Amino acid sequence: MVRRINLVPATQRARTKTDVGLLGVVVGGIVVVAIIGLSYSSFSGKLSSKQDELSQLQAQNQQLAAQLASLADYEVLATQREATQKLVQEVYAGRTLVSDILGDLSLVMPENAWLSDISIQTPDPPVVTGGGAATSKKVKAASLQGSMALNGSTYKFQDVATFLVRLEQMPSVSEVVLGSAGLVGEDADSSKSVRSFSVASVVMNTQDPSTALPLSEVEVSEQ
């Protein structure tokens, strides 16, 4: 058999040998670079997706901000409406119902007595003062007392006393004072002589301050 002769100089023969360690390092580097590339591509895709989501959220946020700005006027109107309702409630609660007073008078009058003159001065309702806006309006304190003067006649002074006692029981009346009482004329039968009397009293607010305003019957303008 013919033997091959290596014609490469001895000093150059080491270069022809495969450097396994270096080759391993190169392959490892290529793998690492490939992994880094794949990771970068994956993260780039996720970043792009998140940026799209962020853009959408920013657009939605701008839309919501615009809607909130458009609703600000309604919030102002709602505040004005609430202030107006509170104002009307205060005025409503400060009323004195003359119909209640007259109704109570009809219940406490003795059977044989009658009134010839009635004068009622009701307490002043709250007075609205201030600017034009509902939020700037204020309510002055109302006068809590009024007055009532009654002139009447009956046949017995006992009826006058009964009338005075019953007047004191009316929730809208206090400080009942008998002004005068006397005979109007002398009849043959003294029991039928007419006795006149006058009574003065203080009239209180007849509307319960806690009475709720019937908003279903009141229209509040929002202009």
Image (cartoon, helix red, strand yellow):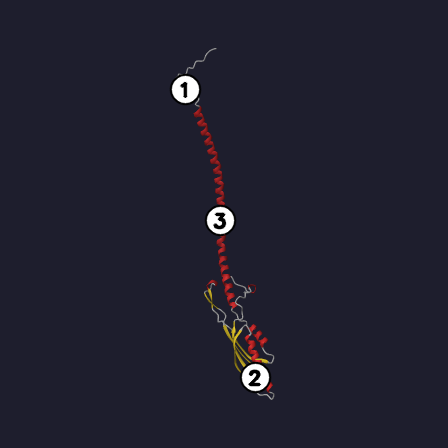
Q: Residue at x 47, y 35 (%)?
A: 39
Residue 117 in picture, x, y percent from top left: 55, 79
The residue lying furthest to the top in this view is: 1
Q: Mark 3: give few (<14), some (14-19) or many (20+) Cα within 10 Å.
A: few
Instruction: Name the residue beneath numbered marker 3.
Output: 61
Position of 139 relative to 38 (above/below): below
Q: Give neighbour class at mark 2: few <14, some 14-19, many 20+ (Cα, 10 Å).
A: many
Which element type, helix, strand or loop, lies under badge 3? helix
User: What residue sits right under mark 2 in the picture?
Assistant: 195
Secondary structure, mark 2, is strand
Q: Amino acid at mark 1?
A: Ala
Does 7 sit left or right of 199 as displayed?
A: left
Q: Which mark is residue 14?
A: 1
Residue 46 seen in the current view: yes
- Disc 3 marks which amino acid? Asn
Q: What is the spatial separation of the Cα atoms under label 3 and label 1, in whole angstroms?
A: 71 Å
Q: Residue at x 50, y 43 (%)?
A: 53
Q: Is residue 3 left or right of residue 102?
A: left
Sequence-wise, which precedes: disc 3 or disc 1? 1
- Residue occupying the far left of the picture: 11
Expressed as whole percent of the image width and height from the top left, the position of residue 129 reads 46, 67
Q: Position of residue 114 (x, y in %)?
A: 58, 80
